[in-house]
Amino acid sequence: MRYQVNAHLLKAIAKVESSENPKAININRQFKSYNEDIGLMQINSRWLPELQRYGIQREHLFDACVNANIGAWILAKQIQTHGNTWKAVGAYHSATPA
């Protein structure tokens, strides 16, 4: 269990987010901004500046193993903030309650 995140939960998120497609891209054009969700776990491009500090570039997110690890890392951050709750799972998908 990397990052102390349940593997079954990660698999469920991958199923819902991308239908387990490591090449999936979802483009978001909301609120006069542009971002995209990338790969298996649909990592939002807003994470790219932070990921670049660790040497992870956008193209690396199309590797299913890299993407799953980043997804686990993001979910672990949300669990630290919100506890092991559905709120943490919701925050994985969106930083805003809406």
Image (cartoon, rainbow, N blue to C red):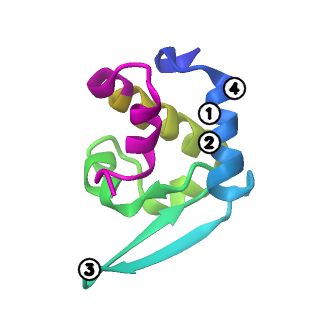
| SS at badge 1 | helix
Q: Earlier in the sequence, mark 2 or mark 4?
A: 4
Instruction: Count neighbours of disc 4 (C-alpha within 10 A) and say few if under 14, some if 14 to 19, many if 20 or more.
Output: few
Q: From the top left corner, tell me how far across and down residue 86 is, in percent.
A: 47, 32
For the record, the magenta segment spans 79-98
What kind of secondary structure does the magenta stretch mostly adopt?
A: helix
Label 2 close to label 4 by CB (< 8 Å): no
The type of residue carrying mark 2 is Ile
**CB contact under 8 Å: marks 4 and 1:** yes
Q: Secondary structure at mark 4?
A: helix
Question: Which mark sits nearer the N-terminus, 4 or 3?
Answer: 4
Q: Is residue 55 left or right of residue 60?
A: left
* Residue under the point 68% across and 38% down: 12
Q: Which residue is mark 2?
A: 13
Image height of 58 relative to 7, above or below:
below
Residue 52 in the image, given as x and y percentages of width and height: 31, 51
Residue 41 location in percent, x, y? 58, 48
Q: Is residue 22 left or right of residue 67?
A: right
* Amino acid type shown at disc 3: Phe
